[in-house]
Image (tube, rainbow, N blue to C red):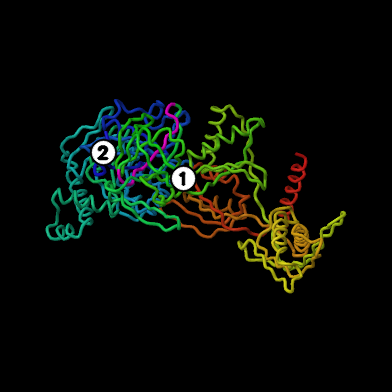
Amino acid sequence: MSHSTDKVRNIVIAGHGQTGKTTLFEHILFAGGVIPRAETLESGKTTSDSTPEEIERKISIHSALGHVERDGTKINFFDTPGSSDFTGDVISSFRASEMAVLTVDGKSGVQIETIKLWRNLDERKKPRGVFITKLDNDQADFAKTLADIKEKFKIEPVPVTIPMGSGGGFKGVIDVLHEKAYLSGGDTVEKESAIPDEFKSASASAREKLIEAAAEGDDGLMEQYIEKGSLSPDEMKKGLIEALAQNKYVPAFAGSALRNSGIIPLLDFAADVAPNPRIAKDIMVDAEGKETEIPIDPDKPVSALVIKTNYDQFSGKLTWVKVINGKLTADSEAHNVTENKKERIGKLYTCQGKKLEEVRELFAGDVGIITKSATLKTNDTLSAVDTGKTFVHLRLPEPVHSIAVSAAAKKDDDKLGEFLVRAAEEDKTFNYHYNTETRETVISGMGELQIHIILDRIKANQKIDVETRVPKVAYRETITKKASAEYTHKKQSGGHGQYGKVLLEIAPLPRGEKYQFVNAIFGGAIPKNYIPGVEKGVIEGMAHGTMASYPVVDVEVKVVDGKYHPVDSNELSFKLAARNAFREAMKQANPTLLEPVMNLTVFIEEKYLGDVMSDLSGKRGKIHGQDSAGGIAEVRAEVPQVELLRYSIDLRSITSGTGSFSVAFSHYAPISGRIADEVIKARAEFKVQEADE
């Protein structure tokens, strides 16, 4: 059954690992009547964690989609991974949803991944709520967790539900919005009841805060609230809808998913208050790079964004799409604007975890799956016609962990490459490339766990043994002073010979300028038609520096004089002369090695701050700043890339697995002394090995 735009809600469940996301998702499907019973992680039978890797490790690795119907409204829920290694699926789910619900452990409070997710939602200006989980556990404290959220995010969360008791005395929750109590269901769906007398005062107090939040949604409602001191239930609902759509408050929910508690009020809020897809906007970009915001609109011609691609052993290739405009229909034709190709849309599906449910159409705002598409891939734009505009790609973080790989058996190299292509297509935070400079196949991802899982899958499914090693760093060479040199290329071998003489002056450029070629020839010392040959020779000379044969960067090259022969000169002669002149000049220009330096941001618990700072100092890092709030520290530094090749492993060891980081290229910086000597020695050994192969 398909649902119109106004009857669709999209909510992503996200949060730090082990905060109960999959358990909440499972019990939502149970409470919604989708599955006959809620399974535990330990059983390996949950709806969302269905792959062998997820079942074995008892963690979510991929996002999963399920839906329930509440009062005629279809509510899509995404269950997302908690580990930063699998953040790509969280990002794609954020893009496809109009609201997020972040799970926060009622005992542990806000943790590192929660903070990173919150910042991502801030960048998107996306409405969000918090579900405080595991309130039946000892030491769980709803009020304390709300205070922690307030301290870390500088917002006042507004309880929509409040707990009745905690720990061993946890009885259930009160739905403040609908003024009902729900007793914990244990193995059954929670039961509605009247609010017990002992909780009426707390419920009334929470309702007052909810009314205040509703008044923020509309100027007229605020006037009404100031004048009368309250709002009617209809006014309250209207205000809550509008204020949440504008991200003016953060609703907070209480519960214990394992005990089927707090689920029904969450579903009622999702159906009654959660943002309608019409409030959301997406961004399109034209061929010139101009961006335009467009609303989700069912009345316009169809357009959709591919948010995810994966492969199922039974159904084959699955292409996940978010419909932005119009209506996507099965057995129809659309245009893949990204690839400028016609695309045949075969069957359409929604899903409950890995179980596909066929539908005839998907309306704007809804999310579904196209099967067996030959060409569609993540980030592609589907449209009714070729508009020349595509949706902006998913904003994914840069990979932070890389390793070099090769098949143990040479015959498996091509097969390994094919599998890596597919893995990179399924997970856009994973990539691989062949580095011609170091002659290595390098794979990169968000962490050691992500890469290990991909390599384990290769071994299990493709029967390929893969060898791994730390990748080589791509160093550079440059010069530190001006120099000049001339070179004459002369060759006689009967008939026409070869002749070209070139005088070059070279000078250092600011870091990052790369290369500049200046033709300063006057009077025709080198004819104009040979100047391109001179530049080609310079570029060839820069490909291999004189210190360790690394590429040369940040050099201005000026050709100032030369000589030609009317019969024997040609472009090749001047290319060879220029290449050798450049190498001679570079030897005199005080060359130096450059190493890549990365911008590093580390997120850790404050108790590990000293150890992390000490470790970064030992890695030649320069600390540029730090911020701390609520026990979580953010450290910003510049660190040489070579020191970070195993940083995901080092940080996990220092922080007992709780720390995370992001990294991006910053600049190249000079190195000298022992470090440079070691680089030159290693490069020489590599060149010998390369020559022997």
Task: Name the residue tied to disc 1.
Answer: 339
- Above or below, 624 against 661 in this view is below
Is 321 included in the stretch rendered in magenta? yes
| The residue stretch that appears in magenta | 314-326
Classify residue 415 as left or right of residue 312. Answer: right
Crowding at mark 2 (Cα within 10 Å: few <14, some 14-19, many 20+): some
Return the x and y of residue 168 as percentages of the image width and height: 30, 34
Return the x and y of residue 396 as percentages of the image width and height: 46, 48
Classify residue 204 as left or right of residue 672. Answer: left
> Which residue ends up furthest to the bottom in the rendered image?
523
Return the x and y of residue 386 as percentages of the image width and height: 40, 48
Q: Nearer the viewer, residue 405 or 364?
A: 364
Q: Which SS type dominates the magenta stretch?
A: strand
Q: Residue at x 32, y 54 (%)?
A: 155
Is 109 included in the stretch rendered in magenta? no
Task: Name the residue tied to disc 2.
Answer: 3
Q: Nearer the viewer, residue 121 or 361?
A: 361
- Above or below, 400 against 487 in this view is above
- Above or below, 450 against 127 in this view is above
Q: Give the amino acid type for the residue marked by disc 2 in the picture.
A: His
Quarter containing the C terminus: top right
Q: Nearer the viewer, residue 529 or 128?
A: 529
Return the x and y of residue 212 as percentages of the image width and height: 21, 54
> Which residue ends up furthest to the left in the rendered image?
228
Quarter containing the N terminus: top left
Q: Give the amino acid type for the residue marked by disc 1 in the picture.
A: Glu
Q: Nearer the viewer, residue 214 or 489?
A: 489
Classify residue 132 as left or right of residue 568. Answer: left
Q: CA distance from mark 1 to mark 2?
A: 30 Å
Assign a secondary structure to mark 1: loop
